[in-house]
Every structure is written in structure tokens, then in C-alpha cells.
Image (spheres, rainbow, N blue to C red):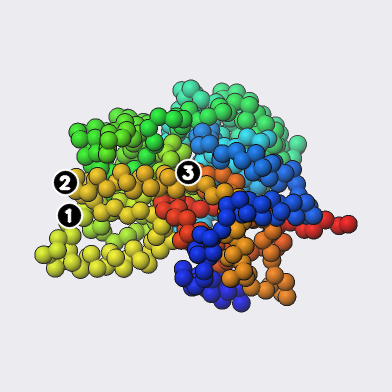
């Protein structure tokens, strides 16, 4: 039944109502007065401290949350089956890192946002990259090296009941050289009787082993208490410079033309696409003048590649993408128009959406779709159909058809980036937003659920970058209805190139 309703709301079109006209006629002062009255009405409901802080912020009229500095990165490494994913789930407090048994299912999520003792950090799960039995030693070592490259703290997990293996000792040698905090996690210590097994790991020479049971949670809190003590406030891996040129990440699967795009934008060969291991480790930050403005490009192609390690290629690309997004404010996702849109393209776009960054899509190699050429015409027709079907959920992202090789239409990237960043920073005053909600609900009420109708009591934009709205409601709103609110917000206020986040706070009336 709910699915039908979702479909109904997804079918609403602009022009089904007089929202735009009604809001255009609205007096701003009157809208603010109405919002204040709605805000007072919230006092009849049970609000927590977080609600109070949020609402106080609105009254003060403070500007949105500033660009958040890159979170510190904590990586979890170790041999297969030592309990890495169980530890990830335990730290997150939810089942996220599920090891899929279905062949062909790629686990491309490698980074998660985690929190402990009011400290937020990015958790990297290397469990998604399991080596084959033959190359296990080399592969686990390479995986540890990746983690050392791209993290601030490393958790090295060993199965204490098995003891240290030759592979573990190989990894220890690498970790000792790393100038980073490393915690030796002795997993599978389910009770005090097994603690001597953990003590035996002292001889690895990595300082004290931390006995834990990832499955039962034993010892994990003590471990995390120590981890947050050594974590930097801001990641040394993905530093976020405040101010200065706006930061742009160029993302895309291999060979779509990311480096060519940067080279063309810079007007010279800045990025040498080099397969030599160890040439450069960090994303190459280039300040480039484009459209009369300076931009800081973070090109992920500059990070050391491990082409010889096939198992690690996707994992590493995903981790690199996450690291670049941590630094960026807006992402240009480059898509090769000569190839069908792939799952990998969609995964990269999903990573951008998850990171909350602004988004521009650059369709590269457009010069290859020649009008006179029948194949080119056919590919163009298929491409438009693919975009309509596969990229409908990001139809709001500015689209630029370019040729990185010839430089065609590169100048169109600048207005697209400026639009996306402007939307990312956009704020709707509380009065206007509540007037929008009131008019919307009057024209399109939320459907009844079990004889009840959830009401929206009050709404506010809690922050920008990305625009994040909070709705105080008397019950859960259908996902379809939330999407409908998002779509109408876009139709009336633009937000072109920026994701919009809508959070709900379901609150009950106070007992008198």
C-alpha cells in the first residue's frame, strides 16, 4: 500500500498546484511571524537538548555550519577471517559491513562515518578486499601499505586464538616503519580465561596487544578510548584548507580522461600518468586558473596505483575517491560517452551523494560522437536513454559535454561549478521554508497511515554545505512524500548541483 502512495507522490509534477504564485505573493515579515508562532507551538511537544540547541541556533539566525575539516581516518587491516568486518560493525554500532556470499556482489563501500566520545572519524574497512589464497602474504601486506598511506591511525587485527602467522609478521615490519599510531587488536578473546592468548602477542613488538571480542563487544570501548586520544583533530591525510580557491575533486573510473581534463584546464602537462609505483602518494593538488578564477583541483589519479594487485584495484580506487571527496567541496564526475554508463560510474556518483558534496557531471570524449557518423549518432541516442534511466536521481546536477583532449567546452565547466557551489551554500529563511511547507501540505496532504495522518509541526534549514532541512513531525513521513518535498524545493528554489538532505524528528505531545 505504501509503495502505491510513494508512486503517487513521485508522479506529482510542477504546475499541479499554485505553490509558486502563493509564495511569491507572501509578505516576508508575515512569513517570519507565522514561523515564530509555529515554533512556540513546538513547546507542547517533548523536545531533547539537541532539538533545543538546533532551535536556539535558528532564533540567533546564525549562518550554517562552516565547511567541516576532513575527519581523521582510522583504518582496520589484517588477514582474512580475523574479524575485521565484525569490528567495523561493533564500532559503528550497526550491521553495515556485511560480507556478501553472493558471487559478483562487489562491496565497494570501504569508508564509514563513525563516532566515539563525541569525536567523529572516518573508518576504513579493508575487509572488502580479500586476497586469493596464493597471493595472501603479498596482498595483505599491500593492503596494510594502502591503509598506512591513507589513514591517521591503524588498527591491526590478529586472531589471538590462532596466534601470529608469517603473514602477520610481514605486516608488522611495514607497520613498524610507519610513522603513525598503530594498535595491535587481539580479537576473539571472549572471556578472561583466554587473555593469556592475547599476552602472547607482545612478542610481535608492536607494543601492548588490546584483547577484544568484536562479536560480543568485550574490550572494544577501552580500545576506542585510547584510539581517540591519539587521533588528530583534522586528518593529516585529507587536510581541508579553509578559504582560498574552491576545492574541486575530479572523479571517474580509470581512463575516462581525469588527468587529461586537469592538464587541459591547466594549459600544460601537470599530471604525468605514470604507472611507476611510488611516484606520488598524495592527491596532486593543483591551483588552476579557469574562467578568470583560481580553483584548487584535487586529482585522484596522482595517488600511487597498485596495478599489479588486481584484487586491490577497486578497493584502492574507492578509498582514493573517498580521500579526495574529504578534501573537496564540489566533485566533477567524468563519464566516458563512448562507453555505456557502468555500475562503477553509478557507485562513484553514490559516493559523492553520500559525502554531501556538490556535483557536476562532465560527459567526456564528446568529439567522438560525430554527427556524420552513423555509429556516433546511434551511441548518442543510446547515451541519452541511459542518462534518462540510470541518472534520473541526479537529474539536478549540471551537465557539461566536453572533450578533455581538444579542450572543447571546457569553459562551460566554470559556470556549472559556480552554480553547484552557490546551491551548496544556499539558505532558505525559516519563515519562507515554513510558508512553503504550509502551502505544500494544504495542496498535497500526507496520506493517512492506519487512520492517522503524520503532521509537520515546524521545519528549518539546520545547515548549508549541503543544504540540510529538519522537519519536526508527529509521525514518520513516507519516503515518497519526503522525495516529493525535495523535488518541490528544487522546482521553487533551484538547488541545481547540490544534494538536499531532509531529516525528520518525530516528537510526541507532552503529557499534561
The relative height of residue 436 versus residue 154 in the rendered view (above or below) is below
Number of the front mark, 1 or 3: 3
Residue beneath the point at 58% across and 74% down? 5
The quarter holding residue 91 reads: top right
Q: Which of these two is toward me, 52 or 158?
A: 52
Q: Position of residue 411 (x, y in %)?
A: 24, 44
- Name the residue that disc number 1 marks: 367
Q: Given contact means CB atoms under 8 Å apart, are the residues at marks 3 and 2 in contact?
A: no
Q: Which of these two is toward me, 33 or 56?
A: 33
Q: Position of residue 76 (x, y in %)?
A: 54, 38
**Left or right, residue 412 beside residue 145:** left
- Name the residue that disc number 2 marks: 406
Callout 3 secondary element: loop
Q: Which of these two is toward me, 79 or 258?
A: 258
Q: Given contact means CB atoms under 8 Å apart, are the residues at marks 2 and 1 in contact?
A: yes
Crowding at mark 1 (Cα within 10 Å: few <14, some 14-19, many 20+): some
- Name the residue that disc number 3 marks: 425
Q: Earlier in the sequence, mark 1 or mark 3?
A: 1
Q: What number of labels is visible?
A: 3
Q: Position of residue 420 (x, y in %)?
A: 40, 47
Amino acid at each position: 500500500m505504501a509503495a502505491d502512495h510513494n508512486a503517487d507522490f513521485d508522479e506529482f509534477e510542477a504546475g499541479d498546484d499554485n505553490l509558486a504564485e502563493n509564495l511569491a505573493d507572501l509578505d516576508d515579515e508575515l512569513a517570519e511571524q507565522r514561523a515564530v508562532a509555529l515554533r512556540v507551538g513546538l513547546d507542547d511537544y517533548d523536545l531533547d537538548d539537541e532539538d533545543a540547541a538546533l532551535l536556539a541556533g535558528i532564533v540567533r539566525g546564525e549562518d550554517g555550519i562552516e565547511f567541516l575539516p576532513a575527519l581523521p581516518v582510522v583504518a582496520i587491516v589484517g588477514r582474512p577471517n580475523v574479524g575485521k568486518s565484525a569490528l567495523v560493525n561493533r564500532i559503528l554500532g550497526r550491521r553495515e559491513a556485511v560480507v556478501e556470499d553472493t558471487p559478483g556482489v562487489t562491496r565497494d563501500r570501504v569508508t564509514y562515518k563513525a563516532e566515539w566520545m563525541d569525536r567523529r572519524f572516518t573508518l576504513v574497512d579493508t575487509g572488502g578486499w580479500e586476497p586469493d589464497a596464493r597471493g595472501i602474504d603479498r596482498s595483505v601486506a599491500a593492503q596494510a601499505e594502502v591503509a598506512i598511506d591513507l589513514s591517521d591511525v591503524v588498527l591491526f587485527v590478529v586472531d589471538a586464538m590462532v596466534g601470529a602467522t608469517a603473514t602477520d609478521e610481514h605486516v608488522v615490519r611495514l607497520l613498524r616503519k610507519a610513522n603513525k599510531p598503530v594498535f595491535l587488536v587481539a580479537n576473539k578473546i571472549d572471556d578472561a580465561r583466554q587473555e593469556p592468548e592475547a599476552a602472547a602477542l607482545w612478542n610481535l613488538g608492536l607494543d601492548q596487544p588490546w584483547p577484544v571480542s568484536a562479536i560480543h563487544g568485550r574490550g572494544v570501548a577501552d580500545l576506542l578510548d585510547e584510539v581517540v586520544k591519539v587521533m588528530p583533530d583534522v586528518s593529516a591525510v585529507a587536510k581541508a584548507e579553509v578559504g582560498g580557491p574552491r576545492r574541486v575533486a575530479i572523479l571517474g573510473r580509470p581512463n575516462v580522461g581525469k588527468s587529461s581534463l586537469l592538464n587541459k584546464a591547466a594549459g600544460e602537462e601537470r599530471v604525468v600518468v605514470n604507472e611507476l609505483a611510488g611516484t606520488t602518494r598524495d592527491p596532486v593538488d593543483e591551483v588552476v586558473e579557469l574562467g578568470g578564477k583560481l580553483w584548487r583541483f584535487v586529482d585522484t589519479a596522482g595517488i600511487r596505483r597498485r596495478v599489479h594487485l588486481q584484487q586491490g584495484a577497486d578497493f584502492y580506487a574507492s578509498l582514493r575517491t573517498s580521500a579526495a571527496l574529504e578534501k573537496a567541496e564540489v566533485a566533477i564526475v567524468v563519464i566516458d560517452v563512448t562507453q555505456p554508463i557502468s555500475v562503477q560510474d553509478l557507485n562513484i556518483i553514490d559516493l559523492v551523494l553520500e559525502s554531501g558534496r556538490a556535483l557536476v557531471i562532465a560527459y567526456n570524449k564528446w568529439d567522438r560522437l560525430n554527427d556524420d557518423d552513423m555509429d556516433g549518432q546511434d551511441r548518442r541516442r543510446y547515451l541519452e536513454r541511459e542518462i534518462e534511466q540510470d541518472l534520473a536521481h541526479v537529474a539536478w546536477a549540471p551537465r557539461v559535454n566536453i572533450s578533455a583532449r581538444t579542450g572543447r567546452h571546457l569553459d562551460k565547466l566554470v559556470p556549472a561549478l559556480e552554480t553547484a557551489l552557490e546551491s551548496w551554500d544556499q539558505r532558505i529563511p525559516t519563515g519562507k521554508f515554513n510558508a512553503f511547507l504550509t502551502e505544500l501540505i494544504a495542496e498535497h496532504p500526507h496520506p493517512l497511515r492506519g487512520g492517522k495522518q503524520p503532521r509537520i509541526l515546524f521545519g528549518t534549514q539546520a545547515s548549508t554545505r549541503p543544504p540540510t532541512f529538519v522537519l519536526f513531525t508527529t509521525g514518520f513521513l513516507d519516503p515518497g512524500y519526503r522525495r516529493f518535498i525535495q523535488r518541490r524545493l528544487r522546482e521553487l528554489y533551484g538547488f541545481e548541483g547540490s544534494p538536499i538532505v531532509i531529516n525528520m524528528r518525530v516528537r510526541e505531545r507532552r503529557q499534561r
